[in-house]
Image: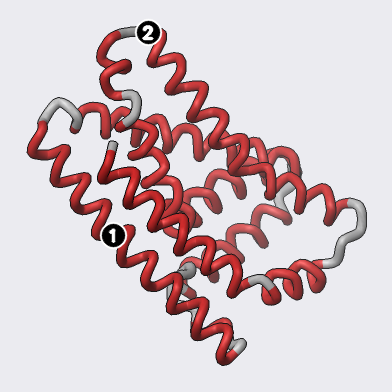
Amino acid sequence: MGFSFCLASFLTYTAMGFGLLRALHLFSGFPIASRIVDVGMIAVLGIFALISFLDAYRYQMSGNPDDVRLQLPESIKLRIHAIMKEGVSAKSLILGGVVIGILVTALESVCTGQMYVPTLVVMAKSQFDGLMAGGEAVSKAWVDLLLYNTMFIVPLVIVFLATYFGLRTEKLVEWSRRNVTVSKVLLGVFFVVMAVLVGVL
């Protein structure tokens, strides 16, 4: 179930990424629309960066997870828990893992998309000329997309294997809480870097 979940998550992210790359490619043919996308992306990334830094400060002061604003809405969290509960009770562990992987990945994209979309925008902007030129650049875009998605699920695979070999959930939660501030600062820096790249490419 764990491996089928990881595989389904990888394939779902890859399909989403391919669709977004194609959409961005189409936008590139219209300078005004492309510029609007760039300006909008820079503005959103700036807001996300500010919220991330504020989240880091608030959590550092209070230690209360509820003070973190940039996270999945509670309604989506509850839906994910329900999907996982139903999937685990499925007769086929492999099929259950695939269903959970697809649905949970789609729901979590509300959060992970904050990193995924700007990364794809930067990736696409650096390759648009080549994409229009022919197959070699298209192949490189695919390789970059597959590489990114592989790296994206590596932590998921590591957590699955660590849990399989005895790591307790409590330890994961404790580690996560200890690193909220650092992760939020790094996320804020990521958003700033992405905004700069979108602006200069």
Residue 120 position in % (x across, y down):
39, 38
- Say which residue label 1 marks: 44
Q: Residue at x 55, y 44 (%)?
A: 102
Q: Is residue 182 above or below residue 112?
A: below
Q: Horizontal placement of 132 versus 140: left or right?
A: left
Q: Nearer the viewer, residue 137 or 192?
A: 192
Residue 199 position in % (x across, y down):
26, 45
Number of marks present in the image shown: 2
Q: Is residue 44 above or below residue 51?
A: above
Between disc 1 and disc 2, whose residue precedes? 1
What amino acid does circle 2 point to?
Answer: Gly
Q: Nearer the viewer, residue 128 or 169?
A: 128
Q: Element under label 1? A: helix
Query: Which colour assignment does the render follow?
Result: secondary structure
Q: Horizontal placement of 1 versus 17: left or right?
A: right
Q: Horizontal placement of 37 versus 198: left or right?
A: left
Q: Element under label 2? A: helix
Disc 1 crowd, CA 10 A, few/some/many (<14, 14-19, 20+): some
Q: Residue at x 76, y 67 (%)?
A: 172
Q: Is residue 52 above or below residue 34?
A: below
Residue 135 numbered mark, or none: 2
Q: CA distance from mark 1 to mark 2?
A: 32 Å
Q: Horizontal placement of 178 versus 195: left or right?
A: right
Q: Quadrant of the N terminus?
A: top right
What amino acid does circle 1 point to?
Answer: Val
Residue 28 position in % (x across, y down):
19, 29
Which residue appears farthest toward the right when viewing the image?
Answer: 166
Disc 2 crowd, CA 10 A, few/some/many (<14, 14-19, 20+): few
Q: Quadrant of the C terminus?
A: top left
Residue 143 position in % (x across, y down):
51, 22
